[in-house]
Image: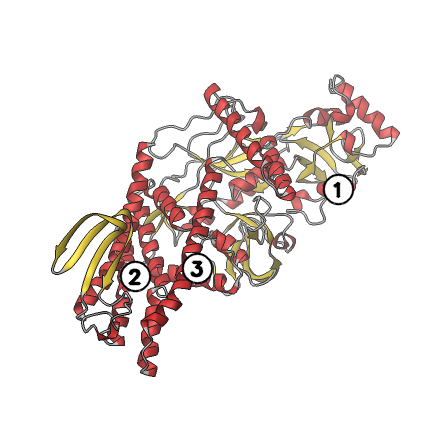
Amino acid sequence: MIISFLYIILALIALSFLIFIHELGHYWMARRVGMRVETFSIGFGKPIYSWVRDGVKWQIGWLFFGGFVKIAGQETDDDKDPYEISDGFFGKSPWARIKVAFAGPFMNLVLALLLFFGLWMMGGREKNFSEFTPKIGWIDPNSDLYTKGVRPGDEIVSYGDHEYQGFKDHIFSPMTASDDTLQITVKKIDYTAKTKTPEEVEVKVYSHPDVIDNGIKTVGITQSASYVIYDTVPGLKENPLPEGSPMLDSGIELGDRVLWVDGQVVYSLKQLNHVLNDDRALLTISRNGTKYLRRVPRVQVLELRLDPDYREELTDWQYDAGLEKTKLRQLYTIPYNLDNENVVESRVAFIDRDGEEDAFPDIVYSTIEDQLEPGDRILAIHNQSVQLPAQLFEKIQDRQVNIIVERGSDFSEQVNWNNADAEFEKQVNWTNLDKMTNSIGTGQSVDQLGSLVLLNTITPKRRADFLLPPERQALRESDLQKKRKMIEEIDDPDKRANALNILENQENQLILGLPVQDRKIQYNPTPTELFNNIIQEIGRTLTALFTGTLNPKWMSGPVGIIHMVHDHSMVSIRESLFWVGLISLNLGILNLLPIPVLDGGTIVFSLYEMITRRRIHPKTMEKLIIPFALLLIGFFIFLTYNDIMRIVSRLWGG
């Protein structure tokens, strides 16, 4: 707590320093053009300490945030024309006033560039692979992108005219789209054949399925690709599996990367969670003499419309499997009629149409989820041979998964972000992976091939059933109560229902109890490249704000900025340099906006006077500035309120 408070103080000092640099620019240029500076204040409010040097009153205000430079003649006086004060602000030429107004933002821009140069000299920042890769980690199956065949592992090239730069584009671009559709360029990748096929698609923008607030938009990409690595925690020598973890007897080792789960190559933690929770069983089947893997719906008997003969067969399998203590309707099966040799005869109808659509969607993830055909013979489930329907019926009661990991690679070695995607692709021996997966369920499965290892079959657990040590369990239950209480206080019934649904899904979610992490990369663009990227991002944000496509509540105000600097200062000094540079650059650009209360407004007034050769009376300027100042204050109050609400929401786990 004390350390956190110290970092907040440091964040405040950093922001005050940026404003001091800004005002120092005004001060230096004002003195250079012959203006008389009366006061240089560090902070606002009544001075707690002051001194005079070279005719300038220097002071430190009690509100240690911000600052100002007061130049003679800037404050209007009914008794004296400010243009008549020869060494005052208005007593100098319009060009001199422009130079003074511009000097403050210019100092911020220069400081940002210097900080980025220092960051570049230090080797850049350590970031997660997922933050800058164009590779997709997970796609919402209800999205247009999914419908059009885009899948995890494919790449985003651009959103509209904006070339993809990082994971923030997955949120920013949909939220600033001018209408309900967005033109996207993607590359569909076949990793085995090593081909990339560019394609342009137009997709709908819609509310993010994982977020309570429907103001957050998406096109369906809900996570960038990442490594899923079980390894030591940075700075520590071990990372033990938690007590009761389903992975304890799996054979997993430190340094292993989860690569393949039940027929899907894993491109993100979110995809892994989806595979664990979509309730499908991995079957090995024989079709016309060729063996295939298929992921088949695992459903309760009560969901199916059974004819009397098939119900009687299921009852026989129930008793043969020793499951007579459980009601038949509560047991799991697959929605297919089988003969006594596990050969598919036909598909079984569902009672509920929605349940049938979930089990057999019109668009499947890949061929591994294609429906079984009459004549297919089931040879194994989860790499365990089955010869009789009763054996299949017994083994399908437990949700199990098969996992292939990549072992022996040094994922602790950082790669340059420019080479990270190529490294991601070549890290895997796709030929060996194909051979290993084709052996599953054949009775001759390959447990290890090169760097690939097939783990023991794993039974995931529900999050709610995963017992933690007493203190952590009590903390978890307290956190759940807080979340439920916050949900109950949501006025909007739709948002309340959505929040409750998300919470219940989280508690019922199957997990592996495996602490994983992404691979670190070295992100180090040149200072000018980083500078230009941020300028472009600021330009996009301002354009979206002024055109109304971006709600200003998603912007950060002073409290949010301090919170971000605080969070990233605790990560590393390099992150601190970046964020201070970022804020300095934003401060410089925003102050150049042609708004009367800002430096840009002063520049516009001076340009008007230069062009028309007509003076604007200071009282007229004041009348123009006051309403904009009030609007700006109101805007900052609005941003501060939203900053506080976001922080409180995170603290309470909302």
Q: Earlier in the sequence, mark 1 or mark 3?
A: 1
Residue for badge 1: 354
Tell me residue 192's x, y (percent): 54, 50
- Determine the CA span between mark 1 and mark 3: 51 Å
Q: Name the residue at 69% across, 28% down.
A: 396
Q: Residues within 10 Å of mark 3 (few under 14, many from 20)?
A: few
Q: Name the residue at 31% across, 32% down.
A: 2
Q: Secondary structure at mark 3?
A: helix
Q: Earlier in the sequence, mark 1 or mark 2?
A: 2
- Between 395 and 54, the residue placed more toward the observer is 54
Tell me residue 643's x, y (percent): 44, 46
Quarter residue 286 falls in = top right
Q: How many numbered markers are drawn? A: 3
Q: Name the residue at 41% across, 60% down.
A: 538
Quick check: 645 above or below 107?
above
Tell me residue 238's x, y (percent): 38, 28
- Determine the CA span between mark 1 and mark 2: 57 Å
Q: Secondary structure at mark 1?
A: helix
Task: From the image, state whether disc 1 or disc 2 is nearer to you.
Answer: 2
Task: From the image, state whether disc 3 or disc 2 is nearer to you.
Answer: 3
**Colour logic:** secondary structure
- Between 393 and 449, the residue placed more toward the observer is 393
Residue for badge 3: 631
Can residue 457 be seen here? The reply is: no
For the residue marked with disc 1, what is the amino acid?
Asp
Quick check: 331 above or below 26?
above
For the residue marked with disc 2, what is the amino acid?
Leu
- Between 245 and 654, the residue placed more toward the observer is 654
Q: Which mark is residue 109?
A: 2
